[in-house]
Image (spheres, rainbow, N blue to C red):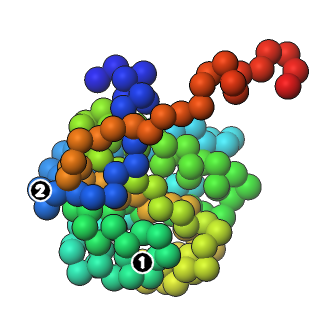
Amino acid sequence: MEVFEAINRRTSVRRFTDQAVDEESIRRLIDAGRRAPSGRNVQPIEFVVITDPDRRRHLASITEYGKFLAQAPVCIVIVSADTKYYLEDGCAAAENILLAAAGLGLGSCWVAGDKKPYAEEILRWLQAPDGFKLVAMLAIGHAASPMVPREKRALDKILHWQTY
C-alpha cells in the first residue's frame, strides 16, 4: 500500500476479531517502529509484544480507556529510556507502527501511557528496567467491522502560510 493511502486509511479500531496476527507481520510492525526518527539518534525505544490473552486482560484491567486491549490479539507496549526526547521518539515510533498496521490491513488503536497514573504499575508489571518510561500501548489486530476513518478538519481550515 502506498504511504498516503495508509495515512488516509488509518483509523482507531477498538473491536477486533479473534484471528491471530502472524509473527512476520508483528516483526514488520516493530521494524517500522524502530525506523522512526530519534532525537540525536539516541534510539532509546524498546517494544514489548504481548500476545498471551491472560496478560492482555491483566494489562487492560489496569488502564482507564484501554479495556479493548484484552480483545486485540496483539498489544505492543512502547517503553523508553528516560532521555531528553523520549516522548517524541516514542510517539514517532508509535505512529510508524499505526501507519504500518494500516498498510498491512490491520486495525490499531493507541492507548496513552506517559502521563497516566497507571504508568509506573505497568512498567513494574512488565519488569522494565529502572528509569524507563511508558510511552504508549498499541492494540493491533483484524478489525471486527470495516475500518472507516473519521472525518478530519478541512485542510484549508488548518493550513496557514507564513503566519497564523
Say left or right for 84 vs 163.
Answer: left
Say left or right for 50 vs 52.
Answer: right
126 lies above or below 38 = below
Residue 12 appears at what percent x and percent y?
40, 49
**Residue 19: which numbered mark, if any?**
2
Q: Is residue 49 visible?
A: no
Please rate how many residues cluster around mark 2, counting C-alpha atoms within 10 Å: few if below 14, some from 14 to 19, many from 20.
few
Q: Quadrant of the N terminus?
A: top left
Say left or right for 97 vs 135.
Answer: left
87 lies above or below 67 = above
- Circle 1 sits in a helix, a strand or a loop, which is it? helix
Q: Residue at x 33, y 67 (%)?
A: 68
Q: Residue at x 42, y 28 (%)?
A: 8
Residue 77 appears at what percent x and percent y?
42, 63
Residue kind at label 1, given as amino acid type = Leu
Say left or right for 58 vs 161.
Answer: left
Residue 105 appears at what percent x and percent y?
24, 37
Q: Quadrant of the C terminus?
A: top right
Residue of label 1: 126
Q: Nearer the viewer, residue 148 or 12?
A: 148
Q: Nearer the viewer, residue 6 or 123?
A: 6
**Nearer the viewer's eye, disc 2 or disc 1?**
2
Q: Residue furthest top?
A: 161
